[in-house]
Amino acid sequence: MKISNRSIGKNNKPFFIAEISGNHNGKISNAIKLIDAAKWAGADAVKLQTFLPDKMTLNSNKGRYLVKHVNSKWSKKTLYDLFTKAYTPWEWYPKLKKYAKKKNIILFSSVFDTSSLDFLEKINFPAYKIASFENNDVHLINEVCKKKKPIIISSGMASFKEIKDIYKICKKNNLVSKLAILKCNSSYPSPLKDINLTTILNMRKKFDCEIGLSDHSIGSTASISAISLGASIIEKHISIDKKTGIDSFFSSNPNEFKDLINKSNDCWKSLGNIFYGPTKSEIKSIQNRRSIFSSKKIMKNEKINLQNIKTLRPRIGVDAKYFFKILGKKAKVNIGKDKPIKWKSLK
């Protein structure tokens, strides 16, 4: 999979997406600061959310149109108010695209309906994201697939069958080679106990596409752990600080984001390949393995037995792995106490 000129896969460093969401707080200057922060932290891409409030929900304060998350600061406010606050003005996009290009960082967006898709096509964004709350919108996914651009889909709340159906749509559109599915828990913040990262291993087996993590948890533990399980993409919300922006309370500030990327890259580097035997860095250590020594004086023609040998460091005698092989052999010469046993001293 490739977005712009960046190859994504297990053989490449993890692809890090800094999600701005509504953390620009309605100011383009903050959006630019967040692009700067993402670049400084080492992210590969910055992601926007492109929608119009009227295309997201109805402007109603009745029942299901109210936010009912007890721990949310938006509790009892309307969904419409929430999306109005999080909205990224479309007139910003040309300037943000130009600025991201100048900073040499990829800029793309989540798409929430066909009108936002059409808008983003005119700007020629390089890839699209489908958020968890839209992963059941099979019509939208099919329309995005028709654009033949890389597509990243979050799997939050989706059953295995639903994810399988999404995969089938992408396969029908010959887009599997450009598809990534992100393990995701769609609560904000996500409790670590509910992220179930082991699913990444299963997703790797079940789907022939890139697998990653959209991480809404606090801290870097989940992201780093996901890398160790084979995630090739990490998406994380970024904020200027813990107060500025609608999602700032669970987002990573620039320093936290940089630390997450550094540690995740170290984790990826440590995965290496399937390898047995001494690595290049271990060659010098081999000489400090155990070898066989005499535990008492051994006379010529005396048999080697459990009572007259022992193993010690370093490896200056017969390698300790041949311990049982030399039992019963006879000494060719007298061997003093605490001397390394040599093959040439045996017959």
Image: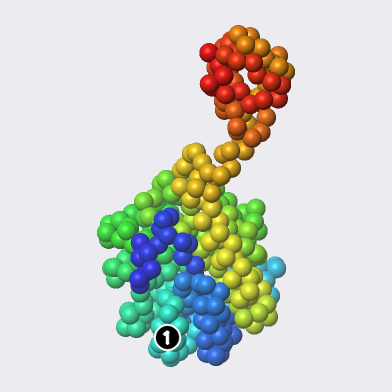
Residue 40: x %, y % from top left: 54, 78
Q: Which scheme is used to colour this image of the protein?
A: rainbow
- Residue at the spot x=56%, y=74% of the render? 41
Location of mark 1 (residue): 102
Q: Amino acid at mark 1?
A: Lys
Q: Quadrant of residue 170?
A: bottom left
Residue 31: x %, y % from top left: 53, 85
- Residue at the spot x=51%, y=81% of the render? 35
Q: Quadrant of residue 221?
A: bottom right
Indicate left or right for 280 with 297 as reference: left
Residue 174: x %, y % from top left: 27, 59
Q: Is residue 287 above or below residue 114?
A: above
Q: Quadrant of residue 108?
A: bottom left
- Residue at the spot x=42%, y=69% of the render? 129
Of the 4 image quadrants, the one containing the N terminus is bottom left
Can residue 139 be seen from the camera position used here?
A: no
